[in-house]
Image (cartoon, grey):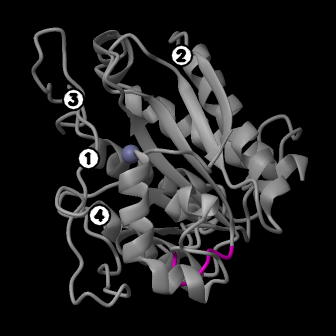
Amino acid sequence: MSQPAPQPEGSTTAGDGAAPARALRGRRICIDPGHDAYWGVGAAGRDALGEIPVHPTEGIPLLEHELTLTTGYRLARRLEQQGADVCVTRNEAGALQIDPYDFSGDGQVRPDSVALEDGPERTQPRIDWANRFRAELLVSIHFNSLDDPSVRGTEVYYSDTGKRSEEGRRLAEHLLFGVLGQMQVEGYQGVGRGIRSDRYQRYPPDIQARFRRNNAVTIARNGFDPADCPDCQRVGVLGNNPMSLHPGDYVGALVEVEFLSNPEVVDELFLRPDALAIVAAGLEAGIVSYFRAA
Ligand SMILES: [Zn+2]
């Protein structure tokens, strides 16, 4: 996906001349479709009967790793049409571009269903791919899930630490407004759950401790204390987690588009023929407005 899309000669303005065409010319953007079929499948959407439906036009089941991949490539093509150079952390068949690799030193990397503490080893290939591409921006796409099926809405995570935190916060805001705005234009009334720090406690303390213990060598090498490491609770792919072997060198945000665990959202949004087109257009709008406002 790194080759630029074909471009019409001499078109520098769109329509009325107000908005420049190819607003992302020369930008280097990496799209990170969350999860994959082997290392960690993510959430599943179910209809009112509890079945995992197949999307009516995309032909894929409502599984998070499928939805992120299709949305990610839709977004990548849109960004290329705007002149951006784009990388995607998974290939079009859905596999990670770089395989996870063992840096905790225990001789293996295990899938998400087997070992939580291998998370940094599964995330690092995504960071590496974006760094290798020299991405200035990384947008990670996820679909949310909770035990409570009534919860709905869109939220965006950014890393509120490091030299890019202010840009990350701005990117998160633009992505949130972009997605909610596009949903509204298309007649879906979304709910904004806000932008949020990527430092959040996802696991009970005992599991967190095991997590840190298994990655103690990397944490210490990064200058943090494995026994007391709040930053170890940061989202891995945004590149500011001390359990990462190499940090991310980009402005990043992670979008949780909507809740697959809410059957009403499945019915009202995800089963719409244009559902993923709406999400991709909303993310594109957010990226364009982020750069325009810079
Ligand atoms: Zn996810």
The residue under the point 56% across, 37% down is 281
Q: CA distance from mark 4 to mark 2?
A: 27 Å
274 inside magenta stretch: no
Answer whether residue 3 is visible to the viewer in this image. no
Distance of label 4 from label 1 (alpha carbons)? 11 Å
In the image, taking residue 284 as reference, residue 11 lies left or right, namely right
Circle 1 is placed at which residue position? 66
The amino acid sitting under disc 4 is Glu
Residue at mark 4: C-beta within 8 A of ligand 1: no
Which is in the foreground here, disc 4 or disc 1? 1
Q: Nearer the viewer, residue 99 or 210?
A: 210
Q: Nearer the viewer, residue 33 or 159?
A: 159
Question: Mark 3 or 1 closer to N-term?
Answer: 3
Residue at 72% x, 59% y: name it: 24
Q: Secondary structure at mark 4?
A: loop
Q: Residues within 10 Å of mark 3 (few under 14, many from 20)?
A: some
* CB of mark 3 near ligand 1 (< 8 Å): no
Answer yes or no: do the residues labelled 3 and 1 have beta carbons within 8 Å? no
Q: Are marks 1 and 2 in contact (CB under 8 Å)?
A: no
Residue 283: percent from the left, percent from the top? 59, 41
Q: Is residue 152 above or below residue 256?
A: above
- Residue 181 percent coordinates (x, y): 66, 23
Query: Which residue bears the numbered disc 4?
Result: 92
